[in-house]
């Protein structure tokens, strides 16, 4: 008769150990580096705020206190998304009996689309010092963002081999795409020329694995560093500029120019039309307002003169 061996599973003894195991599991699933970074940040932020929450008797209370904080709907939903995934894994691993966020719904988020006017974008493009490698990089990265709407994390992960200068296209590999779906983005000649100049300025010793938009020493540029670079440019023009504002500007201006919403959805890498519709609605609102002001009937027909109530009453008495 075969003997049955019972192996007791050893659970992580701290939230740090649990987070490490969780991130390893997500990485094995194929999660993008940026996604792993976001999971780590959100889980760490929660347990830093509530260090005693790694306790089945306390975790529900601490999570509800955290989610009850006065934050924007978008922040609330991000916290919920990342923490709920982490605690679902904890339940499967036997760390907690149930997910403390199982019955906490998302908040309605109207979303904010912040795009930049053309005069600000022109001024921004004049700022990078293209006599330096960093300036060439910034200029090319701004152009690429405005021409394709590529996510900043995806752009900073591009390699030289991902760019087809002759075919005027950039490939976002599935390994770096947020949605893990590869897509090819067409680029205009001006972007190709800027990237060609950037490639020509690279150090001869840099290998093919050094990212296209790297630091002057060949180190990969982080999204946080790119945010700080744009913040410095913002100080010169007096208008806030962020990587996602460049992405939003691409979407708005492309739709205004008459592009199909499904084309914009593909370029942005959205898995559904939900986010793309926000851009479409904003453009349609602009169009309605512009037509209301510029409609030729405003000039062809006389303005209607309303009869005041006093005149109407006087007219009735005369009758």
Image: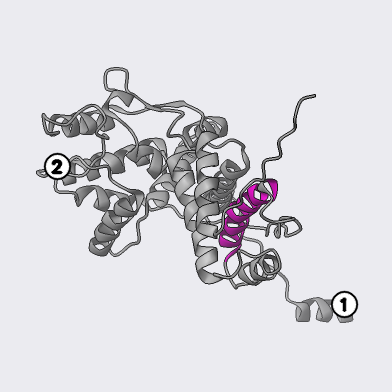
Residue 229's spot in the image, x, y percent?
A: 26, 55
Q: Nearer the viewer, residue 179 or 6?
A: 6
Mark linked to residue 121: none
Labels 1 and 2: the sequence-earlier one = 2
* Magenta-colored stretch includes residue 91: yes
Disc 1, SS: helix
- Residue sitting at x 58%, y 70%: 52
Q: Is residue 113 visible?
A: no
Disc 2, SS: helix
Residue 266's spot in the image, x, y percent?
A: 51, 31
Mark linked to residue 316: 1
Quadrant where the C terminus is found in the figure: bottom right
Q: Is residue 20 left or right of residue 314?
A: left
Residue lying farthest to the front in this orientation:
1
Q: Nearer the viewer, residue 152 or 207?
A: 207
Q: CA separation, marks 1 and 2?
A: 81 Å
- Say above or below: 199 vs 282: above
- Observer-side mark, 1 or 2, equals 2
Q: Is residue 88 left or right of residue 247?
A: right
Q: Nearer the viewer, residue 117 or 214?
A: 214
Q: Nearer the viewer, residue 214 or 145?
A: 214
Residue 176's spot in the image, x, y percent?
A: 42, 34
Query: Would you identify the image quadrant in which residue 173 lies?
Result: top left
- Residue sitting at x 46%, y 55%: 114
Q: Is residue 251 visible?
A: yes
Q: Is the residue marked by circle 1 packed among few (<14), some (14-19), or many (20+) residues within 10 Å? A: few
- The part of the chain drawn in magenta is 72-92
Q: Main secondary structure of the magenta part?
A: helix
* Magenta-colored stretch includes residue 70: no
Residue 70's spot in the image, x, y percent?
A: 60, 73
Question: Which residue is labeled 2 in the image?
Answer: 133
Quadrant where the N terminus is found in the figure: top right
């Amino acid at each position: 008769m075969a003997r049955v061996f019972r192996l007791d599973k050893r659970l992580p003894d701290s939230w740090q150990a649990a987070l490490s195991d969780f991130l390893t599991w997500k990485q094995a699933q194929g999660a993008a580096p940026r996604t792993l970074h976001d999971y780590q940040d959100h889980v760490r932020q929660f347990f830093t705020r509530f260090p005693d929450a790694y306790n089945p008797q306390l975790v529900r209370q601490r999570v509800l206190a955290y989610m009850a904080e006065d934050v924007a709907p978008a922040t609330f939903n991000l916290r919920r998304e990342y923490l709920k995934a982490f605690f679902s894994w904890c339940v499967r691993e036997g760390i907690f009996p149930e997910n403390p966020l199982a019955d906490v719904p998302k908040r309605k988020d109207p979303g904010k689309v912040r795009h930049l006017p053309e005069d600000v974008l022109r001024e921004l493009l004049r700022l990078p010092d293209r006599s330096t490698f960093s300036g060439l990089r910034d200029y090319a990265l701004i152009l690429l963002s405005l021409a394709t709407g590529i996510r900043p994390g995806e752009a900073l992960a591009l390699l030289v081999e991902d760019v087809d200068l002759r075919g005027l296209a950039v490939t976002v590999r599935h390994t770096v795409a947020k949605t893990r779906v590869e897509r090819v983005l067409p680029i205009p000649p001006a972007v190709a020329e800027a990237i060609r100049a950037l490639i020509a300025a690279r150090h001869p010793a840099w290998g093919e694995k050094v990212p296209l938009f790297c630091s002057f020493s060949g180190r990969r540029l982080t999204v946080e560093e790119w945010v700080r670079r744009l913040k410095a440019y913002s100080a010169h023009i007096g208008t806030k500029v962020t990587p996602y504002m460049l992405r939003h500007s691409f979407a708005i201006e492309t739709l205004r120019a008459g592009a199909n919403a499904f084309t914009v959805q593909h370029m942005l890498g959205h898995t559904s039309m939900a986010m793309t519709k926000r851009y479409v609605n904003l453009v349609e609102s602009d169009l309605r307002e512009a037509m209301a002001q510029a409609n030729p009937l405003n000039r062809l027909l006389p303005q209607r003169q309303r009869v005041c109530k006093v005149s109407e009453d006087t007219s009735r008495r005369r009758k």
